[in-house]
Amino acid sequence: MTQESELFSEIKRLATEQRNPASMKIDTASVGDILRIINSEDHRVAKAVAEEIPYIEEAVGIIVNSFRIEGRLFYVGAGTSGRLGILDASECPPTFGEDPERVQGLIAGGREAVFQSQEGAEDLEQTGEQAIKDAGVTPNDVVCGIAASRRTPYVVGAVEYARGLGCKTLFITCTPRSEFPLEVDVAICPVPGPEVIMGSTRMKSGTAQKLVLNMLTTASFIRMGKVYENMMVDLQMTNKKLVERSKRTVMTITGISYAEAGDLLSAAKGHVKTAIVMNLVRVDASEALRRLERAGGFVRPAIEGESFTPS
């Protein structure tokens, strides 16, 4: 009898590789029943993420501290996990007006792997290490591994090398914390249970990872002053939709008309924060910018004339 390989034995024990009792007959189910099974299982995802909020909070603190010293956040993943990291990173510049370098996604197999699976690209720790080298990661940066199974060699290699550089390291995985052997600053371990289709981690695991990524960057950029009340105020007016959203944001906060909002944004050189402070404090653009700088980019203290105090 052929002995099981070490990898086979490891994989068959993973939480993400178990069979789901709720979907054992999904192959003979009607379309409606298939969808109800998927939807019912998806309800487990938010609960699993909610249980990890203390760890997500700790991770946000690490990211914000890095951002405040001009550090960057690097996501590292393979397959679905890598694509989710790239997706989250790519949304930060238009949403929060951030430099594209601030949050970056690294994926096993490189750019081509974003659009088409690159089989075998994830299998060597050395390739993850090289990706960190090629990205020019420094000790001021944060490296966040994303791997539903927690064992992906590319991701493990990248995170371990980054830790050796002196970086703060995070890891998002959908296996239990008790089965997480890596040394990182924060492990985030939502466990939504076996997939509807055994091992298809693009489903519940992917959804859980996406929710965590949303929380990490959204909360971090809120703490960097990118949001006023619950509105994006550092968005970039890079297309017609964002131009109109900028006007609507200024109108909503200040109560001025559509035409007045357009004129105010022109005077503020398209910068929503500046326009808001100009109107609410009745100052010109240069004074509004001075107030924002003194307030660390936060709108509320800029309006009140206060300086920034990190918390």
Image: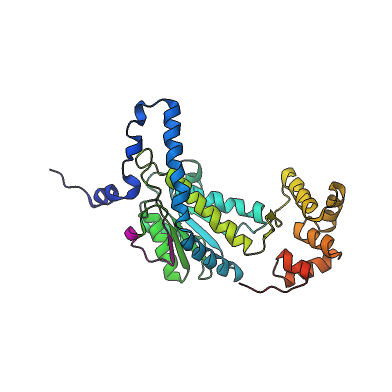
Residue 110 appears in the figure = no
Colouring style: rainbow
Q: How many marks?
A: 0
| Image x and y of residue 240, in percent | 75, 43
- Residue at (58% x, 59% y) in the render: 219
User: Residue 133: horizontal and vertical position, in percent?
Assistant: 47, 63
Q: Position of residue 169 (x, y in %)?
A: 45, 65
**Residue 144 showing in the rendered view:** yes
Q: Quadrant of residue 299?
A: bottom right
Q: Magenta span covers which residues?
A: 178-189
Quadrant of the snapshot with the C terminus: bottom right
Residue at x 48%, y 59% (from the top left corner)? 53
Residue at 31 percent of width and 41 percent of height:
19
Near-viewer residue (234 or 299): 299
Quadrant for residue 117, please give it. top left
Q: Position of residue 274 (x, y in %)?
A: 78, 61
In the picture, the quarter occupied by the N terminus is top left
Residue 292 lies within the magenta run: no
Query: Which of 25/232 is in front?
Result: 25
Residue 186 lies in the magenta-colored region = yes
Q: Nearer the viewer, residue 76 or 133?
A: 76
